[in-house]
Amino acid sequence: MLPASVIEQALSELKIRYYQRLFDPIVTLWAFLAQVLDTDKSCHNAVSKVIAYLAGQGVEIPSTDTSAYCQARSRLPEKFLEKLFSQVGQSLEEKLGTEHLWCGRNVKVIDGSTVSMPDTVENQKAYPQPKTQKAGCGFPIAKIGVIFSLATGAAVALCIDVLNTHDIKLARNLYSFLKPNDVLVGDRAFCAYADMFTIKNINCDAVFRKHQSRTTAMRKGKIVGDCDKLVTWYKPKTCSKGLNKDEFNALPPSITVREIYYYIVIPGFRTQQVSLITTLLDEGTYSTLAIVGLYGQRWDVELDLRHIKTTLGMDVLRCKTPSMVRKEIYVYLLAYNLLRSLMWSAGTTYSTPPLRLSLQGTRHHLNNFIPELLAAISTKRLKIYRTLLEWH
């Protein structure tokens, strides 16, 4: 899943040099991944796993003290972890066939959330706790923005900032990770004039829920179908906080977008109207029902982020410095993408939709199979790996 050759290549490409020691970058990263995948996330447990492996190899057993491992983790460059996280997600993207696309397009979904961390002076300075909490009674909190692949479930881009950062600012730091012809789906927090133009300007498209502050008279616009019309948006009169003057001046005086609205009816509850705004203007290629159905799949990605936080345990981080906090987040997302890779291999091998497999079940299987995979000779290891895939 993440062989030493891949890690060594990343180190070489980033020109990262290291000394040959027990906790070199390869062993340290493997131990770090095992640590975030385990329910016992202590450094002592991670070091114990390394010692158990070395005992099986018949080599000299190091001290059980965790200081060497903790120092080795701190030496892992952040850009190295970011590269591996992105690389694993991208390798999954490259496996997509036409049958995995939506109307011939690759769909990405953007979402945001928060994570807490230990209450240290350094963490408080970099990621202050909410102002509503009394000093000494809260924990530092960071805000994260993540772009996921709708087809694979993998995370493909990440942005980390302070708590009071607006979702749209996080999003603007992530647009550069989109590829031409991508379709980006998101909730109302991302639906702004500048963002619709920016996404279209990089040869991508957007499907966002309309922000509650924007109203459109239903009689205005060009009707293209039932509950479906083309409308003109005009450039805001004042520059928003998230744009500088040059960016604001570069915006066109108006843009044409498509507005689709539909109703969610649940017996016993008030009927809810949902309005979508999209740059997909060709109703012949992208039907009303297709766009509504696409937006409905956004819920799966919200569950993906929830899985990372609750199933894997990223909601409460353990590292005590801002640098290590960011590294810990990248390792969590790398571990998540490795699980998605395993689910993809299992699903495609045994004709089961990968997204229907259980992330928690995959984590359990992988944790239970890792000792056997490490101890087995190469010929037997392949058989064990196939059994791991089949058990999904």
Image (spheres, rainbow, N blue to C red):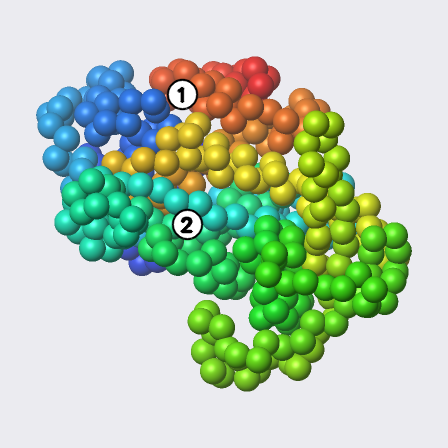
Residue at 59% x, 50% y is: 187
Q: Which residue is mark 2?
A: 144
Amino acid under label 2?
Ile
The residue sitting at 21% across, 29% down in the picture is 43
The residue that appears at 34% across and 22% down in the rendered structure is: 39
Observer-side mark, 1 or 2, equals: 2
Identify which amino acid the numbered label 1 is placed on. Asn
List x then y, in percent, for residue 332: 38, 38
Instruction: Name the secondary structure under disc 2.
Output: strand
* Picture layout, residue 105 above or below residue 100: below
Question: Can you identify the residue that label 1 sits on?
Answer: 367
- Quarter containing the C terminus: top right
Any part of residue 17 in sight: no
The residue shown at (61%, 57%) is 211
The image quarter containing residue 259 is bottom right
Q: Along the horizontal axis of the image, is 323 left or right of 301? A: left
